[in-house]
Image: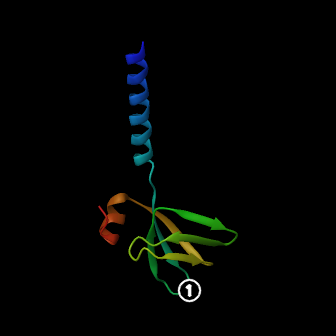
Amino acid sequence: MNVRFRFAAIVLAATSLGLAACGSSYYIVKDAESGHEYYTTNLKHSGDAITFKDGKTRSTVTLQNSEVTEITKDQYGASTGAR
């Protein structure tokens, strides 16, 4: 029974990691004031502002007035050079 328990634990862990990897979202954030475009995988909302880490420069950006659009992983990779 110990072998079955270990096998089940390994399968559960692998499945959880696989689902987490597939659940990533990719966004393009356009600054309404300047028109500058940023790319990110994580957005934090605080009132009217959003904060995120730019995929190109790796800097943290906070915008008050922005437009957020979800994009594909391929679009994100092509724009940021990420694989």
Which of 55 and 30 lies nearest the eye of the viewer?
55
- Crowd tier of the residue under label 1, counting other residues whose Cα lies within 10 Å: few below 14, some 14–19, many 20 or above: few
| Circle 1 SS class | loop
Furthest toward the front, the residue is 2
Q: Residue at x 38, y 35 (%)?
A: 14
Toward the viewer: 6 or 32? 6
Q: Is residue 64 above or below residue 23?
A: below
Q: Locate residue 11 relative to residue 32 in the image: left or right.
A: left
Q: Looking at numbered disc 1 in the image, what kind of residue is underneath it?
A: Glu
Q: Residue shown at 42%/73% (left/top)? A: 58
Most extreme residue toward the bottom, as rendered? 34
Q: Colour scheme used in the picture?
A: rainbow
In the image, residue 53 lies at what x, y percent? Answer: 48, 70
Position of residue 76 relative to residue 23, above or below, is below
Q: Position of residue 4 (x, y in %)?
A: 40, 17
Give me the residue at 55% from left, 81% from top. 32
Quadrant of the drawing holding the N terminus: top left
> Label 1 belongs to which residue?
33
The location of residue 75, given as percent across then percent down, is: 34, 64
Q: Nearer the viewer, residue 16 or 68?
A: 16
In the image: residue 28, left or right of residue 32: left
Answer with the quarter of the image where residue 40 lies. bottom left
Report the front residue among 75 and 50.
50
Placement of 22 over or under 62, stated as above or below:
above
Vertical order, 17 against 45 (above or below): above
* Quarter occupied by residue 63: bottom right
Residue that appears at 51% across and 87% down: 34
